[in-house]
Amino acid sequence: MKEILSYLFEKKILTKKEARNVLLNVGQGKYSDPEIASFLTVYLMREIAPQELAGFREAFLELAIPADLSGFNTIDVCGTGGDEKNTFNISTVTAFVVAGTGEKVVKHGNYAVSSACGSSNIMEYYGYKFSTGQDKLRKEIEQAGICYLHAPLFHPAMKYVGPVRKSLRLKTFFNLLGPMVNPSRPKNQIVGVYNEKAVDLYHQVFADAGINHFIIHSLDGYDEISLTGNFRIVSDSEDKVYSPRDIGMPIIRAEAIYGGKTVEEAAEIFSNILEGKGTDPQNQVVRVNSAFALRCLHPEKSFEDCLSSVKESIESGNALRVLKKLIAQQ
């Protein structure tokens, strides 16, 4: 590590292979906490390069417990977190709405970091049993159309990094890595990121990895399409800034998508939306995020057609039935 740190302190950039190797060593417990802290600090002082992030991603996927769901055309719907906006669990609701349209969703997530309730908190609240069991995951996605991968179970290497991140109390490149390291390696991903620089970084890494993707960012700082202002979407086929009105949506107030102060409050919002009892702003935000997820899977379809499909998923009760089927298997 000494040689690597000396190299980095000279403001040099690692190759993809060098980045992969150093993070493999981190994830195998070969470095001390002070060495890991020094390494993380480098990337607090300068931006991470695309090839470095790609190398880190490769290493973490190699170290992860695999989830072989390659027999399905799956999508992951997630965000980086870290926007400190404390919205309700938009990506988690979106995952069930998308599954309610008949698509296959592999949601990768964790407990809350910057909000009161993360996707794992929601899933646990409703009785979902976290597992790395391949048979369980395949059965869930076959019968319910969705399964959930609780990140800490699939990434045991994080035990060497977690204490350091906790002691630093700063946003490190691991905040960027989270949505990139779904151990099932889905063919499609829609990812919300917390700033514009991360949009371009994600796009380059995903494009190089051959992943069909939509990277989204609301320009007022949300890691999802919040409808509180303009938002940007980048994929292999477009790089565009939208206004909510461009897609027939109103601009909504930030407080209308607040997520509550407790897991219980967040879970109530989650169930209300799936039961068709969400507020207009809550429904609109879920629909637009879900519609773009469908467009990621089916670029040949219009946004209007995708929006119609996700509205049907909620109004018909299909999204709610997905949740009930999934929980009934636990």
Image: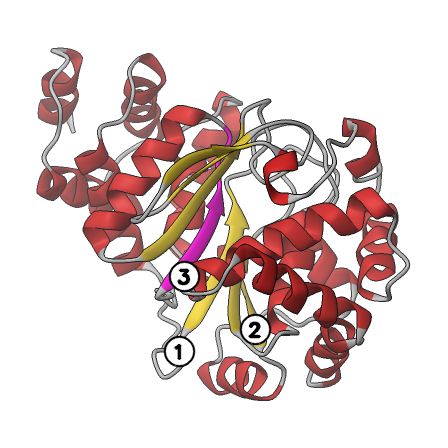
Dominant SS of magenta comes to strand
* Residue that appears at 76% across and 79% down: 321
Secondary structure under the numbered disc 3 in the rendered image: loop
**Is residue 94 at least partly visible in the picture?**
yes
Depth check: give the residue in front, 222 or 40: 222
Rounded to the nearest whole Å, what is the CA distance between mark 3 and mark 2? Answer: 24 Å
* Residue that appears at 8% across and 24% down: 3
**Is residue 153 at least partly visible in the picture?**
no
Q: Percent position (x, y) of residue 213? A: 37, 53
- Specify the label residue 69 is tagged with: 1
Depth check: give the residue in front, 4 or 179: 179
The C terminus sits in image quarter = bottom right
Above or below — where is 103 with respect to 329? above
Query: What is the residue that sits farthest to the right in this orientation?
Result: 277
Secondary structure under the numbered disc 2 in the rendered image: strand
Q: Percent position (x, y) of residue 182? A: 41, 59
Mark 1 or 3, closer to the camera: 3
The N terminus sits in image quarter = top left
Q: Percent position (x, y) of residue 19? A: 17, 38
* 267 on left or right of 41: right
* 131 on left or right of 38: right
Q: Amino acid at mark 2?
A: Cys
Counting residues from the start of the chain, the first of labels 3 and 2 encountered is: 2
Mark 3 or 2, closer to the camera: 3
Residue range corresponding to the magenta coloring: 188-194
Counting residues from the start of the chain, the first of labels 1 and 2 encountered is: 1
Q: Which residue is mark 2?
A: 147
Secondary structure under the numbered disc 1 in the rendered image: loop
* Residue that appears at 72% across and 37% down: 87
- Specify the label residue 250 is tagged with: none
